[in-house]
Image (tube, helix red, strand yellow):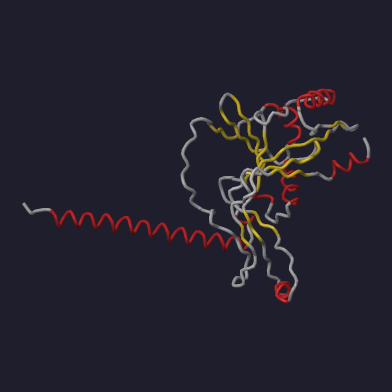
Amino acid sequence: MTSAASDTEKSPSFEWTWGSSTSSGYCSDEEPDSEFEQYFTAKTSFFPKTRKANVTAKVKQDEQIEWGKQELTTADFQEKVKEYNAQINSNLFMNMNKDGSYTGFIKVQFKLARPVSVPPTKKGGSDAGARRAVGVKRRTSFYLPKDASKHLHISSRTSAREVIEALLKKFTVVDNPGKFALFERSERHDQVYVRKVSDNECPLRLRLCAGPNEKILSFVLKENETGEVNWHAFSMPELKNFLRILQREEEEHVKQIVQRYALARTKMQDALAGSTPG
């Protein structure tokens, strides 16, 4: 292969696709009364509301998809690359390399429920110099549009963890990559199957074996929900921000409970006042 091809394999290229021009929220670091990072937290909740079950599409977690475990030879991969390229209607082809590896494109959809953090815009002035002098770290956090997606050019040897790190680096997201995970999604027999892709799996191999049909296989970037929150992965300002959120939600729950009992007490007192002894 040419040197250009090898450079492409080492440096993944990106194509940003927007389905909507409106993001869910934005927060700047220009708040003068805080020495910590500023976070937009209107949608962040420790107690998410219960969602109604979707009767038309049943979601099953951790369904193992067999094409990722297929044992294939170099000749098999060459044949599959030809079959794959014959099925697509765009220029997002896969290409074989002399060493038996291959390069191609995967599309990753963003389904993030929490905001991501990026470095603040650099601005001059004495105020900015003073912040650097005291070592205060500031970030800008915002919500990515839920219908956003990105095409990523990778190698067959690129792991899922490397895909996540490349996506975050592209957008200068400073959050810990361990907070995110890559999932594969497929639709079969009127059901939706979702499986977490392990860090050492190669997404392009899954894409090749499944074919280009997005219904058969698509990739989704989500928060890494392990069942337990890895608090050590968060920075000190983030943890303090979570505590503020938790306190506000606790106060709101207490307020609702007090109002509920006060209303019940009022109704019982009215009932007692209107009843005749007998």
Residue sitting nearer the eye, 212 or 231: 212
Which residue: 60% across, 70% down? Answer: 34
The residue drawn where x is 12% and y is 53% is: 275
Seen at 85% across and 23% down, the residue is 75
Q: On screen, 92 above or below 221?
A: above
Residue 238 occupies quadrant: bottom right
Q: Residue 227: where, in percent of width, then height?
A: 56, 45
Where does the image place residue 210, in percent across and percent down from the top left?
71, 27
Q: In this picture, is 69 found above or below 160? A: above
Q: Which picture quadrant has residue 137?
A: bottom right
Q: Where is residue 200 in the image (x, y as percent from the top left)?
A: 73, 39
Q: Horizontally, is 53 left or right of 169 in the view?
A: left
Q: Where is residue 249 in the image (x, y as percent from the top left)?
A: 46, 58
The residue sitting at the left extreme is 278
Return the residue found at the far front: 21
Q: Which residue lies furthest to the right in this view?
A: 2
Front in this rendered view, residue 155 or 125: 125
In which quadrant of the rendered view does residue 80 lie? top right
Q: How many labels does the image show?
A: 0
Quarter holding the N terminus is top right
Q: Reply above or below: 217 against 226.
A: above
